[in-house]
RNA sequence: UGGGCGGUCGCCAAGUGGCUAAGGCAUCGGCCUUUGGAGCCGACAUUCGUAGGUUCGAAUCCUACCCGCCCAGCCA
């Protein structure tokens, strides 16, 4: 009896486990946080933050961090702040702030009222700096940038103490105040932490806390002419906001001792910094510096060019937030160097769109087909399912008539046996319509096929044959007199190499740009239902791929972006031959 | 040559001394199909950077070595 009850519990437990999403595996950060929560560290609170610098657009790499930080907050019943790390006014703008907010919201995350700016803490940070001066662990240094570099030493040689290291607290306080008042020229002095010029960690060799910089800050205007450095800002900002786990990328691992040092010297509440590896995606770049270069030099149309790995680019390309979140979950979080195959991302969007995208017919490279035995003036309306994966999406009517367009590559004059499409004497199905058989071909003097003549079998209306006769191929098509001319933009990888930074001497990543990353087709013929396509609407063009309406689209001239092609085993067979 | 971090299948990635080293992507077969799509089924690491050692037992512990990434901004 007892065992029966026990067994039931076990079964229930197993069942519950089995329905958990497969891709919610526990990464090392969640493991740490789980433990912290169990041991009641930080009173069991979990509080993260996403801290972008508003000097560029968010990209797919940032998405990992966003999903991690907001995802952890959600998983552990905590909070995630949005904090702009705006300590360097050069290059930071309100436009970037707006784009970042839009992208995070689009990705599906909400920071509620917790929108913060490091610059809001400038006053407080200044106060912290004076505390450290009074404590004798910070000093004003008059070394020029060049001299400071010399004094810093090298990777293998320790640095030397600055000659200004021994100034009294009073003198430092006075100097720092005058720095703040604008009494000294840009770059003439810095405030430095007095730590250890012989430290093997270069970040600890008396790092700069404040620099003199006369630049207009997008939120503070000209209020300040000194700005705090990242290291002197980030930890304290985390501390002020009550962040528990400060997650950042691995290049900050060397900065952690400094993060800890400031918090300890200031005797402040102390969050924990944890580092993880950035994500690299094949055939693209993530470096903000390089992305901005592509934009400024006109290699792409802007930050939101559909070839860019930016969230705005992916959005314009037709990617869904769901697919991107799925992708971030699948690639996980770890610490090893990586180059994630872009096929993984493409898989995610195909999977999402397969379930949700409307199927429509569009002929990208039209070839005229005339059905000789179909009445000249006749048009009929045929029923087409909107998504066979999802019958709830219903169906629509599509016009059929004597003259049609099919895809050029769906006809071949001398095909191999493996070719299932139209060829002289062969019968195929026109999707949702009829079986048609190719009777003859009209060519121009160069031998190029201009038109194909077929006969149809009236008994196969809808695409079924009464006698159970099978056809190998099913083609998409549009009615020539009803279709709309459209522009379709086909996108390919922006770079030719998996790792665009793999270059020879005297070359940079731009020498790996793919000259064929964008192909524009202007003479496409799409079914009439697409006349009202709103920008951003996603479709599956049957047998071709997933497409979405571009903002440039109008009912005069519909424009579609290819998000990703369908998997194409036929192309693969041909390639392998 | 200093410090930090990493190395598990082509790519990501579980694994935290004990059943046959998860899973996903990719790839390759087969089935099915009104999308050569989707779906379904199957194959895919005798071995965890290398070499030693500890142990009844090692991807997991120890030692040495090799390889990769990051750090010498008054960037973040």
Image (cartoon, rainbow, N blue to C red):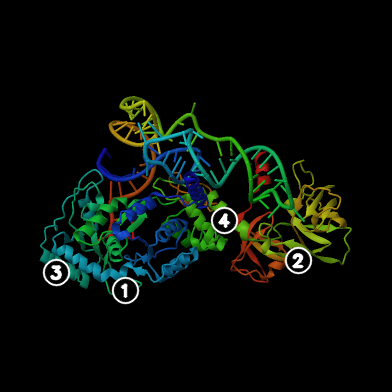
Asked whether the residues under the numbered discs 2 and 3 touch, taking CB atoms below 8 Å apart as contact, a structural biologist would say: no
Residue at which label 3 appears: A174
**Sooner in the amino-acid sequence: mark 3 or mark 4:** 3
Marks 3 and 4, how far apart at CA: 59 Å
* Chain under callout 4: A
Residue A218: % across, % down: 36, 72
Residue under numbered circle 2: A397
- As drawn, A27 above or below A241: above
Identify the residue at image location x=55%, y=53%.
A348
Dots 3 and 4: beta carbons under 8 Å?
no
Residue A93 visible, this angle: yes
The residue where tag 4 is placed is A349
Q: CA distance from mark 2 to mark 3?
A: 81 Å
User: Quick check: marks 2 and 1 in contact, CB under 8 Å?
Assistant: no
**First in sequence: mark 4 vs mark 2:** 4
Foreground tag (2 vs 1): 2
For the C terminus of chain A, the image quarter is top right
Q: Secondary structure at mark 3?
A: helix
A101 to the left or right of A208: right
Judge depth for marks 3 and 4 and give the one in front: 4
Instruction: Give the number of the disc on residue A220.
Output: 1
Across and down, in percent, residue A414 comes to 79, 44
């Amino acid at each position: 009896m007892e065992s029966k009850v026990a067994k039931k519990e076990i079964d229930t437990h197993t069942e519950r486990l089995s329905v958990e999403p497969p891709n919610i595996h526990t990464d090392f950060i969640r493991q740490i946080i789980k433990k912290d929560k169990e041991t009641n560290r930080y009173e069991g609170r979990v509080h993260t933050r996403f801290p972008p610098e508003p000097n560029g657009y968010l990209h797919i790499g940032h998405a990992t961090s966003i999903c991690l930080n907001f995802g952890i907050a959600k998983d552990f019943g905590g909070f995630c702040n949005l904090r702009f790390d705006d300590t360097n006014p050069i290059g930071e703008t309100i436009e970037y702030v707006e784009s970042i907010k839009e992208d995070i919201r689009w990705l599906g995350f909400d920071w509620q009222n917790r929108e913060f700016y490091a610059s809001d803490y400038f006053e407080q940070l200044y106060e912290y700096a004076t505390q450290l001066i009074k404590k004798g662990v910070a000093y004003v240094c008059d070394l020029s940038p060049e001299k400071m570099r010399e004094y810093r030493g090298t990777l293998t040689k320790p640095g030397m103490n600055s000659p200004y290291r021994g100034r009294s607290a009073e003198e430092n306080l006075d100097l720092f105040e005058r720095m703040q008042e604008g009494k000294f020229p840009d770059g003439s002095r810095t405030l430095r932490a007095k730590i250890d010029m012989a430290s093997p960690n270069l970040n600890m060799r008396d790092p700069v806390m404040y620099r003199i910089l006369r630049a207009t800050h997008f939120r503070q205007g000209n209020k300040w002419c000194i700005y705090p450095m990242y290291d002197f800002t980030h930890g304290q900002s985390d501390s002020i906001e009550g962040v528990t786990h400060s997650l950042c990328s691995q290049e900050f691992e060397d900065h952690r001792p400094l993060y800890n040092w400031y918090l300890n010297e200031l005797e402040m509440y102390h969050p924990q910094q944890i580092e993880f590896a950035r994500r690299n995606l094949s055939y693209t770049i993530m470096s903000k510096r390089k992305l901005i270069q592509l934009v400024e030099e006109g290699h792409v149309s802007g930050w939101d060019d559909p070839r860019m790995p930016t969230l705005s680019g992916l959005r314009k390309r037709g990617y869904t937030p769901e697919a991107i979140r799925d992708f971030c979950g699948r690639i996980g979080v770890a610490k090893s160097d990586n180059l994630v195959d872009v096929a993984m991302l493409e898989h995610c969007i195909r999977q999402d769109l397969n379930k949700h995208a409307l199927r429509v017919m569009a002929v990208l490279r039209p070839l005229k087909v005339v059905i000789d035995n179909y009445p000249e003036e006749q048009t009929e309306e045929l029923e087409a399912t909107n998504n066979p994966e999802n019958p709830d999406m219903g169906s629509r009517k599509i016009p059929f008539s004597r003259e049609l367009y099919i895809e050029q590559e769906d006809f071949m004059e001398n095909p191999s046996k493996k070719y299932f499409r139209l060829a002289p004497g062969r019968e195929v199905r026109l999707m949702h319509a009829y079986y048609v058989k190719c009777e003859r071909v009209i060519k121009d003097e160069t031998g190029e096929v201009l038109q194909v003549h077929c006969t149809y079998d009236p008994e196969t209306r809808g695409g079924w044959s009464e006698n159970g006769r099978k056809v190998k191929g099913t083609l998409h098509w549009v009615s020539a007199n009803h279709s709309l001319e459209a522009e379709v933009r086909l996108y390919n990888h922006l770079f030719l190499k998996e790792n665009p930074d793999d270059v020879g001497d005297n070359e940079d990543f731009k020498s790996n740009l793919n000259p064929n990353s964008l192909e524009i087709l202007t003479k496409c013929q799409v079914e009439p239902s697409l006349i009202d396509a709103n920008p951003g609407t996603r479709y599956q063009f049957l047998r071709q791929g997933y497409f979405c309406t571009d903002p440039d689209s109008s009912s005069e001239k519909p424009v579609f972006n290819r998000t990703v092609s369908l998997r194409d085993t036929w192309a693969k067979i041909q390639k392998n031959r």
